[in-house]
Image (cartoon, rainbow, N blue to C red):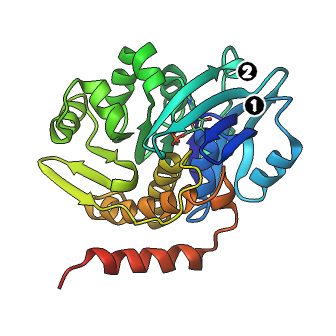
Amino acid sequence: MLTVFGSVALDTIHTQYGVACDIMGGSSTYAALSASRFTETGLVAVAGTDFPDEYIRMLEGAVDTRGLRIVPGKTFRYAGRYQDNFDTRVDLGVEPNVTMGNEPAVPPEYQKSRFVYLANTDPIQQASVLERFPEAMFTMCDTINHWIDTQRDDVVRLAGMVDAVIMNDGEARRLTGHHDLVRCAQHVMGWGAEFVIIKKAEHGSILFHADSAYPLPGIPATEVIDPTGAGDAFAGAVMGYLDSVGRAGVDDLRRACVYGNVMGSFVVSRAGVEGLASLSRDDIEGRAERYRRMISVE
Ligand code: AMP
């Protein structure tokens, strides 16, 4: 089983098409739903009593929710607005609510997980969940500007505790102070992570390992409805695929990043988690095969 820890949220997302209020969001929600298309996935997160039953049922249909703690109070809320034809997202509000003062609980059944993904949330909580998995074979963390701005030292400490760090290009630049992405990745690897994955939205991703870089182009999309969660779905797919093969060498990570780009591309074409919920393994393999053909040159 893969364990995924992070935020479960109610998101309010403004796009050029309108406003979607209090829809199911959260870094671990997207990551776990995406991972669940590849492997058995256990979710660790804290939500409030206002988190709708229908969202819980939807999660239960795809992932193991024994690690989802529902506590009295309001669920974490995030609001953001996309601008410039989806090129930038401005944060309008982050309300931690029940994620503050309520420790996540890791069910004993999850502790056998050999692969653990720490989706974007408070880096102190990410580190404390990681400590519950001393035997894990491969661990990866994400972060976001909010934590880089408010708890940078904790983010840096966490980057030294995991096998891989995944971030988008803007976050990598903000965290390290470099512009060049190769230097950003080397800087992060200097803190201890063996792999760094930098996501570049519609321009794909670069996997870094030792002195090598493995770029992948983005999958051309004709229809972008809501990019929220695409990065989390990318990371969930990487971890889900790695758990499914039970290995995490550099070639496995290269193959995993193909699935990362594929799952990210499914998310952007629908609002919220809709792009993930209905996907079959055939849909995923079909797009992955077309993508592999697109990137191979005779
Ligand atoms: P992404 O579009 O991949 O950056 O992920 C967006 C998701 O992350 C949304 O569903 C939000 O609920 C969640 N999110 C946004 N800000 C934070 C934060 N500071 N901590 C935890 N989760 C967050």
Residue 154 visible: no
Q: Position of residue 296 (x, y in %)?
A: 25, 78
Point 36% across, 32% down: residue: 171
Q: Which residue is mark 1?
A: 47
Q: Position of residue 130 (x, y in %)?
A: 49, 32
Name, please, the residue furthest toward the left: 211
Toward the viewer: 136 or 6?
Answer: 6
Q: Which residue is mark 2?
A: 98
Point 46% across, 65% down: residue: 221
Give the amino acid at mark 1: Ala
Q: Vertically, is 128 above or below 61? A: above
- CA separation in Å, label 1 and label 2: 6 Å
- Quadrant of the snapshot with the C terminus: bottom left
- Give the mark nearest the N terminus, 1 or 2: 1
Q: Are marks 1 and 2 in contact (CB under 8 Å)?
A: yes
The numbered mark at residue 1 is none
Residue 11 visible: yes
* Neighbour tally class for label 1: few under 14, some 14-19, many 20 plus, Cα within 10 Å: many
Q: Position of residue 206 (x, y in %)?
A: 27, 52
Q: Vertically, is 145 above or below 275? A: above
View quadrant of ligand 1:
top right
Picture quadrant of residue 217: bottom left
Point 64% across, 29% down: residue: 78
SS at badge 1: strand
